[in-house]
Image: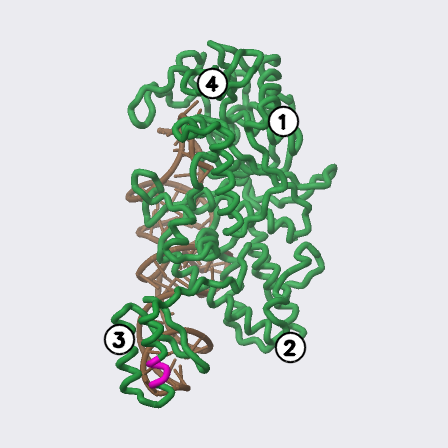
Chain colours: A green, B brown
RNA sequence: GGCGCGGUAGCCAAGUGGUAAGGCCGGGCUCUGCAAAAGCCCCAUGCGUCGGUUCGAUUCCGACCCGCGCCUCCA
């Protein structure tokens, strides 16, 4: 069964298939701007793209996943100058941090991760083509895209360009950039920006003088370089729909003369935090590190971020994170029972051949079908738990099929079970109390044992008895 | 104003023209010296409001109310 996905351009839910003349499914995703740590809102989008890619691979489609690194723009230049570092050194640090977080969250590495600063010649080339074809003009050393030369501009977001509200001030009430005055129309956007003193040493040669590329052009140039004139799917957060993706379409189609830039548009909804829009001023822009510091595992964060449908804004809350923790625990216990019924051990719980189309789904076929219906992750999770709670008697052979199906579905979701949680080391005084209580219990001196339990509680520790010993937990 | 998304139990969240998955929380039970954990059971005559179509609508149509996002560089 192919994966069906809603397409922003056509507003239809269509199957994702290999094109007749193609051997690989080309997928381009707008990546991070590396000027600081990515926040969980960024990661929601990247995780959703990861789930989509995994679903396609599970379906047996060969995918080429390209996700760029935006390492030359206003923010990276400003950040590097403030940090007193060369641009590439500054962005390398944040790129490494991004990769580290991605690995922790279980994201597959894209097959190609092109850097914008490493593709300046390609961007210049595309701009030159646009100028040659009359789709761009030079003004004061900058180059702008002439929107009125692109009749179908606005087709993705269905915005009628001529009705764009013109504004001479931004949302903060400040006058917009001086370069506004060099544009022929408010709708036109920069392809190349002339060097200005605040760019410091960051300047590149071009036929129009020294400067740097505009923002939108990098994705057009890099998708062309790595996926060709047209490709299968383009993804990003909803906010990129306009103007970024709209501009990409205009640039690419006008530069190559070929329509149908991307076959499918995948936009994921934004994240809210505790009912509020995420913003720096509200201090609710959480990073992975901040959540890990609060004791949550990256897997719990991943679960919480995929627990809502990708086209519905998700309200990220600590309650949701706790919910994810309980749910993962339940999944792990169920997997253990299933493994046991199949005569397997935990180390067998890996899906080495997820892309094997003949691999079994067992009772997890409905869970997979949910994913195929517009990447319905919440529906998929519901199906998994339905199996977990079912009273079906299963034979060992059926259990082995189920194990295969569960492993495949969890791989597709990118959920890794049985990860060790770092146990908090009990201080010596607490460990001493614990040992004394255990001894008292063994001696059936329950009065002393209960007293010691209360003393532990007073110190903020809980003692959990097992058959053969005990654990000390904080809180 | 334009474009778009959503309103389903205490919270989160699927879904369907034929009478509401699942998770969390809560309640009960079992087990356990206690506690915790775990397992089992229970938990929306109801799906924003009002009309319409229909044998039948939460699901289709219309209107309205409410919340949210984007509208030039935020995933």
Residue A446 image offset from top left, x and y in percent: 31, 87
Tell me how far mark 1 sits from mark 4, CA to CA: 20 Å
Any mark on residue A259, and which?
A: 1
Tell me how far mark 2 sits from mark 4, CA to CA: 66 Å
Tell me how far mark 1 sits from mark 2, CA to CA: 55 Å
Label 2: how many Cα within 10 Å (few below 14, some 14–19, many 20+): few
Closer to viewer: mark 2 or mark 3:
3
Any mark on residue A188, and which?
A: 4
The correct choice, above or below, for A70 with respect to A418 in the image is above
Between discs 1 and 2, the one toward the N terminus? 1
Residue beneath disc 3: A455
Closer to the camera in the image, A333 or A16: A333
Closer to the camera in the image, A326 or B68: A326
Closer to the camera in the image, B50 or B70: B70
Closer to viewer: mark 1 or mark 3:
3
Q: From where the camera sits, is residue A147 visible?
A: no
The correct choice, above or below, for A376 with respect to A423 in the image is above
Res. A320 image quadrant: bottom left
Mark 1 and mark 2, same subunit? yes
Span of residues in magenta: A436-440
Between discs 2 and 4, the one toward the N terminus? 4
Tell me how far mark 4 sits from mark 3, CA to CA: 70 Å
Any mark on residue A395, and which?
A: 2
Q: Is residue A434 left or right of residue A99?
A: left
- Identify the secondary structure beneath mark 2: loop
- Going 43% across and 16% down the picture, which residue do you hit? A196
Q: Residue furthest bottom?
A: A444
């Amino acid at each position: 069964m192919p994966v069906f996905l809603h397409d922003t351009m056509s507003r239809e839910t269509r199957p994702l298939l290999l094109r007749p003349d193609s051997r690989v499914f080309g997928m381009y995703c707008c990546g991070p701007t590396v000027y600081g740590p990515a926040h969980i809102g960024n990661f929601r989008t990247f995780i959703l793209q990861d789930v989509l890619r995994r679903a396609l691979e599970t379906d047996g489609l060969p995918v080429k996943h390209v996700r760029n690194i935006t390492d030359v723009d206003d923010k990276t230049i400003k950040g590097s100058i403030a940090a007193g570092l060369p641009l590439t050194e500054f962005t390398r640090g944040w790129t490494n941090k991004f990769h580290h977080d991605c690995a922790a969250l279980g994201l597959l590495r894209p097959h190609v991760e092109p850097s914008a600063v490493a593709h300046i010649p390609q961007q210049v080339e595309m701009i030159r083509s646009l100028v040659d074809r009359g789709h761009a003009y030079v003004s004061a050393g900058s180059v702008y895209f002439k929107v009125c030369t692109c009749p179908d501009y606005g087709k993705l977001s269905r915005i009628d360009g001529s009705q764009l509200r013109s504004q001479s001030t931004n949302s903060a009430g400040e006058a917009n950039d001086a370069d506004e005055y060099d544009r022929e129309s408010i709708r036109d956007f920069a392809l190349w920006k002339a060097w200005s003193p605040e760019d410091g040493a960051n300047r590149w040669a071009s036929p129009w003088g020294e400067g740097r590329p505009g923002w939108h052009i990098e994705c057009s140039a890099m998708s062309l370089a790595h996926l060709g004139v047209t490709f299968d799917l383009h993804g990003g957060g909803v906010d990129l729909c306009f103007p970024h993706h709209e501009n990409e379409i205009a640039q690419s189609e006008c530069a190559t003369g070929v329509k149908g830039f991307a076959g499918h548009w995948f936009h994921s909804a934004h994240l809210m935090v505790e009912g509020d829009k995420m913003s720096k001023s509200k201090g609710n822009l959480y990073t992975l590190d901040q959540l890990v510091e609060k004791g949550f595992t990256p897997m719990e964060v991943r679960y919480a971020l995929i627990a809502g449908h990708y086209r519905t804004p998700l309200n990220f809350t600590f309650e949701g994170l706790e919910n994810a923790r309980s749910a993962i625990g339940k999944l792990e216990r169920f997997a253990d029972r299933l493994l046991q019924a199949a005569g397997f051990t935990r180390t067998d719980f890996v899906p080495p051949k997820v892309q094997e189309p003949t691999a079994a789904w067992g009772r997890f076929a409905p869970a997979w079908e949910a994913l195929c219906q517009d990447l319905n992750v919440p529906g998929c999770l519901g199906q998994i738990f339905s199996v977990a709670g079912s009273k079906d008697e299963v034979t060992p052979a059926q259990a082995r099929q189920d194990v295969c199906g569960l492993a495949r579905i969890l791989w597709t979701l990118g959920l890794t079970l049985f990860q060790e949680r770092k146990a908090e080391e009990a201080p010596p005084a607490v460990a001493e109390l614990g040992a004394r209580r255990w001894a008292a219990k063994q001696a059936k001196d329950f009065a002393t044992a209960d007293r010691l339990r209360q003393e532990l509680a007073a110190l903020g520790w809980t003692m959990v008895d097992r058959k053969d010993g005990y654990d000390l937990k904080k809180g």
